[in-house]
Image (cartoon, grey):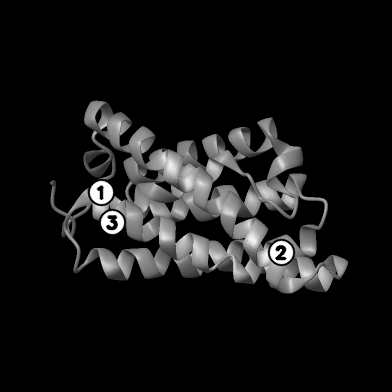
């Protein structure tokens, strides 16, 4: 991995942790209103952002989650699965906004993994918990679409990380 890619992913991981900790009580409940999840949209610009996002999720859960063991397995697993699905779909969908909408849907749907975690850990009702965690995830990612899109207009996320074979085109 190139130094620039490593450094940018380190910054993404750090930002994920800081934003998660800033609203910690809301990021670890059965609603899962974790604003840092907006960073999940970065993979629609460049698949190499997966490293920073997953590292951020892992470290935030390791150091700040009240249910460390569960969150390291289920939380990190849900992020990896969802990001990989988005990356695969991104090969076929070229429009940035459409990919961000798809990413929102993928993460919202896969919140059943977190609902299962909360059901195992606390005995919370699975379907209701899936509904509440999915709703929180949907709201955060839906709000994140225009925010990340407009930040990209200024920063150009696709070019921040070097990639020898660019698979994602600009709009």
Q: Answer yes or no: is residue 46 visible.
A: no
- Mark 2: few, some, or many residues within 10 Å (few <14, many ≥20)? many
Q: Quadrant of the N terminus?
A: bottom left
Q: CA distance from mark 1 to mark 3?
A: 5 Å
Q: Write the residue at 36% across / 64% down.
A: 86
Q: Write the residue at 32% across / 57% down.
A: 47
Location of residue 69 by image quarter: bottom right
Q: Position of residue 40 (x, y in %)?
A: 44, 50
- Mark 3: few, some, or many residues within 10 Å (few <14, many ≥20)? many
Residue 155 falls left or right of residue 84: left
Q: Is residue 55 above or below residue 102?
A: above
Q: Answer yes or no: is residue 58 visible.
A: yes
- Look at discs 1 and 2 and give the one toward the viewer: 2
Q: Write the residue at 13% across / 46% down.
A: 171
Residue 38 falls left or right of residue 168: right
Location of residue 158 by image quarter: top left
Residue 166 falls left or right of residue 123: left
Q: CA distance from mark 1 to mark 2?
A: 28 Å
Question: N-terminal of the two: label 1 or label 2?
Answer: 1
- Which residue is the site of mark 2? 129
Q: Is residue 7 above or below residue 102?
A: above
Q: Position of residue 135 (x, y in %)?
A: 58, 54
**Quick one: which residue is furthest to the right in this view?**
122
- Look at discs 3 and 2 and give the one toward the viewer: 2
């Amino acid at each position: 991995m190139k130094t620039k890619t490593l450094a940018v992913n380190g910054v993404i991981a750090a930002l994920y942790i800081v934003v998660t900790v800033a609203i910690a009580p809301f990021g670890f409940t059965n609603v899962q209103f974790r604003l840092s999840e907006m960073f999940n949209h970065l993979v629609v610009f460049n698949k190499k952002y997966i490293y920073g996002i997953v590292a951020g999720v892992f470290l935030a859960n390791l150091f700040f989650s009240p249910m460390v063991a569960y969150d390291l397995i289920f939380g990190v697993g849900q992020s990896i699965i969802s990001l990989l699905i988005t990356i695969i779909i991104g090969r076929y969908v070229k429009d940035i906004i459409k990919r961000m909408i798809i990413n929102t849907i993928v993460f919202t749907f896969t919140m059943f993994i977190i609902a299962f975690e909360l059901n195992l850990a606390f005995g919370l009702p699975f379907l209701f918990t899936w509904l509440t965690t999915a709703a929180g995830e949907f709201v955060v990612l839906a709000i994140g679409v225009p925010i990340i899109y407009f930040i990209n207009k200024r920063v150009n996320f696709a070019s921040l990380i070097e990639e020898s074979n660019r698979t994602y085109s600009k709009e």
